[in-house]
Image (tube, helix red, strand yellow):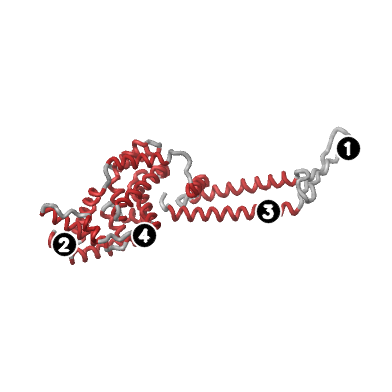
């Protein structure tokens, strides 16, 4: 769905069209859930954040002035909901055993390599401070630009660039130490 | 590992993980239903909902401070005018207060009839009543400002986006 189509959907939502809202959610559901999931490390918490985020989106979509910028706006609401959850209950750090359990080892050899790679990246990401991980998720999963990430997280652009740079350096070092490049 | 390669790895990782974790279609359908029903199920409940409604009425929105300030100025003017009017009415209410009752000096008619000339009509309010009303208005305004500021900060912290 391109920007114009999304903007048209938003305008219909602003008139109270629930079908348009359903279509909008369908378009961005993976992005919204993914952001919440990667930030919380917890599927149930991510579902709660997304559910509450959808309520906020529906209640306030009439106040969105520029329908063309719907994606950062949606992500911003979900990120706020996740951060609100963190304020109530601090973010759990993912235990390595739990991370390991998330991957299925009973896979064919070619997929098992992929699984191993995913496991390494997951552990490396878990070692990042929350703000840096958030920046990495928004940049490389949500495909937001640096100015958009700055708007979503209410931080200066320079801070976001710095967080991304530090995160990438850390990940590169860790993954190299784990020998990921050799396997790729 | 170079940055392009790492970025590619991260994108692939995120995509795979998100696809595996995303809830099934029926969860999304019920989530959308809950979201749209939540705003159509009548008045909100609880203190937070009450405060949110009040904020909406007063247009207190960190993103649009002009409307909040304008609304507060209008509310202040209305409050002052209504208070003053109420003060005058109460002060003139017969037998209502222990202070000096207001005195109305009847118009003095001079000359022959017609014409009739009204020379003076005075309604005097007790000084203590006026100053009390000024204090009440001042305190209320200060309270109103404090409440607005608190709500603004609360909303800013709670929801920095919307």
Quarter placement of the N terminus of chain B:
bottom left
* Residue at mark 4: A90
Q: Secondary structure at mark 3?
A: helix
Bin the neighbour count of mark 2 within 10 Å (Cα to Cα): few under 14, some 14-19, many 20 and up. some
Across and down, in percent, residue B71 comes to 54, 47
Viewer can see residue A4: no
Bin the neighbour count of mark 3 within 10 Å (Cα to Cα): few under 14, some 14-19, many 20 and up. some
* Residue at mark 3: B134
Across and down, in percent, residue B26 comes to 29, 40
From the image, state whether disc 3 or disc 4 is nearer to you: 4
Across and down, in percent, residue A94 comes to 28, 59
Q: Chain of mark 1?
A: B
User: Which residue: 64% across, 48% down?
Assistant: B80
Residue B31, labelled with which disc?
Answer: none
User: Which residue: 13% across, 56% down?
Assistant: A113
* Residue at mark 2: A180
Does mark 2 fall on the same chain as mark 1?
no
**Separation of residues labelled 2 and 3 (CA atoms):** 76 Å
Label 4 or label 2, whichever comes before in sequence order? 4
Q: Secondary structure at mark 2?
A: helix
Mark 2 vs 3: CB contact within 8 A: no
Q: Secondary structure at mark 4?
A: loop
Across and down, in percent, residue B111 comes to 88, 37
Residue B111, labelled with which disc?
Answer: 1
Q: Looking at the rendering, which quadrant does residue A181 occupy?
A: bottom left
From the image, state whether disc 4 or disc 1 is nearer to you: 4
Does mark 4 fall on the same chain as mark 3?
no
Q: Chain of mark 2?
A: A
Mark 1 vs 2: CB contact within 8 A: no
User: Which residue: 83% across, 40% down?
Assistant: B107
**Separation of residues labelled 4 and 1 (CA atoms):** 89 Å
């Amino acid at each position: 769905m391109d920007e114009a189509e999304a903007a048209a959907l938003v305008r219909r939502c602003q008139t109270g069209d629930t079908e348009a809202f359903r279509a909008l959610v369908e378009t961005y559901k993976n992005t919204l859930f993914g952001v919440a999931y990667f930030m919380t490390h917890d599927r149930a918490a991510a579902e709660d954040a997304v559910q509450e985020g959808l309520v906020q989106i529906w209640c306030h979509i009439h106040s969105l002035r520029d329908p063309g910028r719907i994606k950062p706006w949606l992500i911003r609401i979900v990120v706020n909901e996740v951060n609100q959850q963190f304020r109530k209950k601090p973010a759990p750090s993912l235990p390595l055993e739990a991370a390991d359990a998330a991957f299925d080892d009973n896979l064919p050899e070619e997929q098992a390599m992929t699984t191993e790679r995913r496991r390494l990246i997951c552990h490396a990401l878990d070692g990042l401070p929350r703000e840096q991980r958030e920046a990495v998720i928004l940049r490389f999963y949500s495909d937001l630009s640096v100015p958009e990430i700055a708007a979503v997280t209410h931080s200066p652009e320079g801070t976001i660039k710095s967080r991304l740079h530090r995160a990438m350096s850390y990940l590169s070092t860790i993954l190299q130490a784990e020998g990921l490049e050799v396997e790729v | 590992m170079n940055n392009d390669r790492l970025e590619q790895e991260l994108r692939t990782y995120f995509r795979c993980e998100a696809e595996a974790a995303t809830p099934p279609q029926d969860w999304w359908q019920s989530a959308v239903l809950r979201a749209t029903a939540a705003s159509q199920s009548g008045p909100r409940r609880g203190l937070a909902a009450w405060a949110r409604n009040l904020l909406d009425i007063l247009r207190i929105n960190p993103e649009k401070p002009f409307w909040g300030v304008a609304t507060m100025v209008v509310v202040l003017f209305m409050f002052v005018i209504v208070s003053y009017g109420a003060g005058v009415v109460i002060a003139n209410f017969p037998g209502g207060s222990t202070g000096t009752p207001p005195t109305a000096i009847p118009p003095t008619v001079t000359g022959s009839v017609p014409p009739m000339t009204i020379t003076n009509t005075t309604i005097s309010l007790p000084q203590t009543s006026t100053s009390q009303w000024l204090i009440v208005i001042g305190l209320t305004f200060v309270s109103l400002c404090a409440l607005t500021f608190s709500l603004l900060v609360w909303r800013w912290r709670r929801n920095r986006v919307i």
